[in-house]
Image: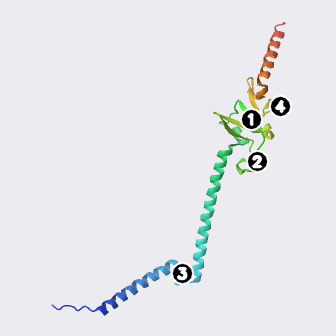
């Protein structure tokens, strides 16, 4: 059997042809992948189209990130400011507590988007949730106050759920009411 002679030049030539074929196929695949206008070439028009596509994708991603950040900020502000709106009053979960606070809207809440249109807010005071009502929104609640609305903390009248008494006048008021009731009873009995 005759041995085939190894020819380095011929082997190199064959390898070169194979590499050129592969490179040509790879080149065609790359051109086809980046050819945006399907003209079979990769040129400046394709670069412009790619830039536009990348720009649109980047813009969309930036918009989505901004929208997500704004949503998280709103949720955080709601959690911090705890606003109360007039429509909350109709919820079965909303119950006006025995102790309330009358206040003015502060600058932070006035500037916050989540507090626009609010009539008050919740705040945590020790182990209870305190309802803070803005003085200019009192009419929404349909409450009455004794002696007026100039005090800060009010407690509910034990005889009338819609009547709140200033905390500093609470015991004096109840004593007056008790004395008035006793006088009425005495007069009714003919004393």
Quick one: label 2 or label 3, which is nearer the N terminus?
3
Residue 189 as seen in the image, left or right of residue 7: right
The residue carrying mark 3 is 38
Q: Is residue 86 above or below residue 43?
A: above
Helix, strand or loop status at disc 3: loop
* Total count of labels: 4
- In the image, what residue occupies the spot 44% across and 81% down? 26
Give the Cα distance between marks 3 and 4.
Answer: 80 Å
Residue 175 picture location, percent across and down: 78, 18
Disc 1 to disc 2: CB gap under 8 Å: no
Give the Cα distance between marks 3 and 1.
Answer: 71 Å
Quadrant of the image containing the C terminus: top right
Q: Residues within 10 Å of mark 2 (few under 14, many from 20)?
A: few
Q: Residues within 10 Å of mark 1 (few under 14, many from 20)?
A: many
Q: Which mark is residue 148?
A: 4
Q: Which mark is residue 107?
A: 2
Q: Which mark is residue 68?
A: none
Give the Cα distance between marks 1 and 2.
Answer: 18 Å
Q: Nearer the viewer, mark 3 or mark 4?
A: 4
The residue carrying mark 1 is 101
Disc 3 to disc 4: CB gap under 8 Å: no
Give the Cα distance between marks 2 and 3.
Answer: 59 Å
Quick one: label 3 or label 4, which is nearer the N terminus?
3
Res 163 → quadrant: top right
Q: Nearer the viewer, mark 2 or mark 3?
A: 2
């Amino acid at each position: 059997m005759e041995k085939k002679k190894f020819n380095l030049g011929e082997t190199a030539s064959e390898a070169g042809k194979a590499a050129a074929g592969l490179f040509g196929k790879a080149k065609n695949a790359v051109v086809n992948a980046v050819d945006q206008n399907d003209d079979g070439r990769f040129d400046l028009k394709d670069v412009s189209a790619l830039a536009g596509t990348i720009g649109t994708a980047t813009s969309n991603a930036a918009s989505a990130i901004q929208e997500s950040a704004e949503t998280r900020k709103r949720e955080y502000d709601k959690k911090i400011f705890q606003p109360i709106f007039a429509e909350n009053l109709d919820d079965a979960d909303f119950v006006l507590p025995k102790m309330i606070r009358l206040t003015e809207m502060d600058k932070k809440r006035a500037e916050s988007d989540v507090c626009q249109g609010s009539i008050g807010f919740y705040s945590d005071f020790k182990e209870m949730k305190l309802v803070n009502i803005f003085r200019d929104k009192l009419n929404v609640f349909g409450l009455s106050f004794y002696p007026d609305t100039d005090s800060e903390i009010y407690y509910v009248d034990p005889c009338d759920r819609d009547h709140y008494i200033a905390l500093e006048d609470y015991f004096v008021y109840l004593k007056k009411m008790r004395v008035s009731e006793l006088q009425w009873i005495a007069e009714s009995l003919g004393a």
